[in-house]
Each structure stands twice: as C-alpha cells, then as structure tokens.
Image (spheres, rainbow, N blue to C red):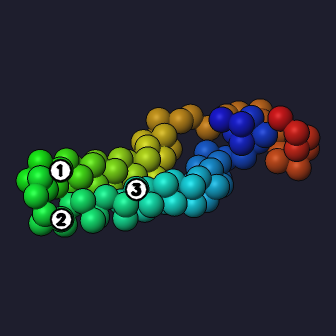
C-alpha cells in the first residue's frame, strides 16, 4: 500500500514487495523445516509421538509459505483496483 501511495502500479508494487520479503520468509521457513527434519526422520524411542507432529509442522510451513509468497499476491492483484490521479513515482518523496 505504501508503494501504491508512492505512485507505483499494482503489479510493480507486488513485484517490489515480493522481492523484498522473499529472503526473510524463505530463511525463516527453511531453518524451521531443516530443524524439524531430524525429529521427523527419527526412529528412536518416543518418535511415534513426535514424528507426526514434526511432519505436520513441515507440511503446514511449506503450504503457508506458498500461500504467502504466491497466492496472496495473486489474489491482491485481482482484487486491487488501480489508483487514478496518482503522482508519478519520480514526483513522490522517498520518505513515507
């Protein structure tokens, strides 16, 4: 919304926001998934309780990451209406 207020088109704003958020989202997701893998693959005593939990967490994180990075931006691009009378991106001050 800040980028839209600065005069960028909906597609430009979604692309810029996606690039900015990709790295932190992927770092968080991958570290959690890799941290859960030993528990998911464990064959030790008590793993019959913890293994399904870790598999559910890994699956949920994977799906929520796809929703965050793909589904929500697509849905936003379909729902958002282009702004009229918005200033050009060069004419708006950088500090918002």
Circles 2 and 1, Cβ within 8 Å, touching? The answer is yes
Image height check: is 10 above or below 36?
A: above
Q: Nearer the viewer, residue 78 or 37?
A: 37
SS for dot 2: loop
Residue 37, image x and y in percent? 28, 64
**Residue beneath the point at 49% across and 60% down:** 26
The residue at the point 10 percent across, 58 percent down is: 45
Q: Do the CB atoms of the residues marked 1 and 3 lie less than 8 Å apart?
A: no
- Residues at circles 2 and 3 in contact by the CB criterion of under 8 Å: no
- Which residue, given by chain and number where applicable, does mark 1 sit on? 50
Q: Earlier in the sequence, mark 1 or mark 3?
A: 3
Q: Is residue 35 left or right of residue 13?
A: left
The image shows residue 70 at horizontal and vertical percentages of 42, 53
On the rendered structure, is 13 left or right of 81? right
Whole-Å distance between the Cαs marked 1 and 3? 15 Å
Q: Please state which of residues 27 and 77 is positioned toward the viewer in this rendering.
A: 27
Q: Specify the label residue 42 is tagged with.
A: 2
Of pointers 2 and 1, the one earlier in the residue sequence: 2
Q: How many marks?
A: 3
Nearer the N terminus, badge 2 or badge 3?
A: 3
- Identified at 21% across, 60% down, the residue is 40
What residue is shown with label 3? 32
Looking at the rendered structure, the secondary structure element under dot 1 is helix
Decide if residue 16 is on the left or right side of residue 77: right
> Which of the image's four quarters has the N terminus?
top right
* Residue 81 visible to an observer of this rendering: yes
Counting other residues with Cα less than 10 Å from the Cα at mark 3, is it few (<14), some (14-19), or many (20 or more)? some
- Is residue 11 visible in the rendered image? The answer is no
Q: Residues within 10 Å of mark 1 (few under 14, many from 20)?
A: some
Residue 75, image x and y in percent?
A: 42, 42
């Amino acid at each position: 919304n800040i980028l839209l207020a600065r005069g960028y088109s909906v597609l430009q704003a979604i692309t810029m926001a996606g690039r900015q958020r990709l790295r932190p989202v992927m770092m968080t997701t991958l570290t959690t998934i890799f941290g859960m893998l030993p528990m998911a693959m464990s064959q030790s005593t008590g793993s019959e309780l913890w293994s399904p939990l870790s598999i559910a967490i890994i699956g949920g994180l994977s799906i929520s990451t796809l929703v965050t990075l793909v589904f929500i931006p697509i849905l936003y691009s379909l729902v958002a209406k282009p702004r009229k009378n918005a200033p050009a991106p060069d004419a708006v001050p950088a500090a918002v």
